[in-house]
Image (cartoon, rainbow, N blue to C red):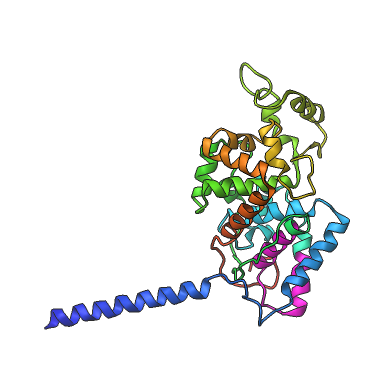
């Protein structure tokens, strides 16, 4: 009888734990209407701030999209990339891969505007996710309903930026990096299409145009005249701090030009080129190169998936300060 009662008690306890965890997941789940009641004008307010910033600086969209990506790949989408370093801690934004991140002021301005409407309601992580979506849409790309309800993180460590996929990664390294975050090969190719916006400094691709290997100075997969143009702006002993090249020929327009150029041997990073070294990923590159609609559809799906990587603990008022 005692054993039977113990079994019943164990069953009840298991059910209770299951329901508690289920409820916790529901509470932490993201929702497209998360702020409908508490801050209904949050999205339009953020969009206005991004639009204003773009009028003064055409590099803002690429910066915000990259910032969101770098945030989500470290500790999930928790806004930790926004935090400033302190005397005791060097934050993510000061890690080597993030030194070139910029336009943090856009997120600060958007957060300030939202705080004026709805104090202590909208997380910094959600502001960044929404601003990244606006960056794509305002550059001529697709729009989508961003799931919201992210919690802001308190931890930001520069050392953890080593986990970010590097521009020199091969396809195996890229696949492993994305898989660790629950992202597929399809997501890898679609999200790489974000390179349709932006600019790369010489240091990110010098491995392809100088001393590529013992036998060749230049990566043979680069189209010859394109390689020559890259070498002209990034000589071997380059000293120009801001020298580099656009990631595609329409760097302020969100389109599928990146994939078309990739098939022509005109990609910037080794990681871009690696997408055509696998049959599966090359097929997707070709698909997106031939159909902007297919690319945009896949990009939206993958962005929602990536921006839903969990992370964070609480909502803070200041996006820059570690509590």
Position of residue 141 in the picture relative to residue 189 (left or right): right
Percent x, y of residue 168: 62, 36
Q: In the image shown, does 229 or 93 lie closer to the viewer?
A: 229
Percent x, y of residue 268: 70, 35
Percent x, y of residue 153: 59, 65
Q: Is residue 143 magenta?
A: no
Task: Looking at this view, name the residue that lies furthest to the right.
Answer: 56
Indicate whether 172 appears above or below 83. Answer: above
Q: Is residue 129 magenta?
A: yes
Read off the magenta span: 108-135
Residue at x-position 56% and y-position 32%: 277
Q: In the image shown, does 187 or 76 lie closer to the viewer?
A: 187
Q: In the image shown, does 37 or 295 lie closer to the viewer?
A: 295
Task: Looking at this view, name the residue that lies furthest to the left.
Answer: 1
- Quadrant, the N terminus: bottom left
Indicate whether 227 appears above or below 45. Answer: above
Position of residue 205 in the picture relative to residue 179 (left or right): right
Percent x, y of residue 121: 66, 77
Residue at x-position 65% and y-position 23%: 220
Residue at x-position 58% and y-position 72%: 31
For residue 313, say whether it is visible: yes
């Amino acid at each position: 009888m005692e054993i039977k009662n113990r079994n019943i008690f164990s069953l009840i306890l298991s059910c209770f734990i299951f329901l508690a965890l289920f409820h916790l997941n529901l509470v932490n789940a993201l929702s497209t209407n998360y702020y409908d009641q508490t801050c209904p004008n949050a999205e339009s307010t953020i969009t206005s701030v991004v639009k204003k910033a773009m009028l003064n600086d055409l590099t803002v969209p690429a910066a915000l999209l990259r910032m969101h990506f770098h945030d989500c790949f470290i500790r999930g989408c928790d806004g930790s990339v926004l935090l400033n370093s302190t005397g005791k801690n060097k934050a993510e934004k000061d890690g080597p891969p993030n030194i070139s991140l910029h336009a943090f002021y856009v997120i600060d301005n958007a957060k300030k505007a939202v705080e004026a409407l709805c104090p202590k309601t909208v997380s910094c992580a959600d502001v960044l996710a929404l601003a990244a979506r606006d960056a794509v849409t305002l550059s001529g790309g697709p729009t989508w309903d961003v799931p919201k309800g992210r919690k802001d993180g308190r931890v930001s460590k520069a050392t953890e930026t080593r986990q970010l996929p590097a521009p020199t990664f091969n396809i195996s390294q890229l696949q492993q990096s994305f898989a660790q975050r629950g992202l597929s090969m399809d997501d890898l190719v679609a999200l790489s299409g974000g390179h349709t916006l932006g600019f790369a400094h010489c240091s990110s691709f010098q491995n392809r145009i100088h001393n590529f290997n013992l036998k060749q100075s230049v990566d043979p997969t680069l189209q010859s005249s394109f390689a020559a143009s890259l070498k002209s702006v990034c000589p071997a002993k380059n000293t120009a701090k801001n020298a580099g090249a656009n990631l595609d020929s329409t760097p302020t327009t969100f389109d599928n030009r990146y994939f078309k150029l990739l098939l022509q041997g005109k990609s910037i990073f080794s990681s871009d080129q690696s997408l055509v070294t696998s049959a599966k990923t090359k097929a997707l590159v070709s698909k997106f190169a031939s159909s902007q609609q297919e690319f945009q559809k896949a990009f939206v799906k993958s962005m929602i998936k990536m921006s839903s990587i969990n992370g964070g603990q609480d909502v803070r008022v200041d996006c820059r300060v570690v509590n």
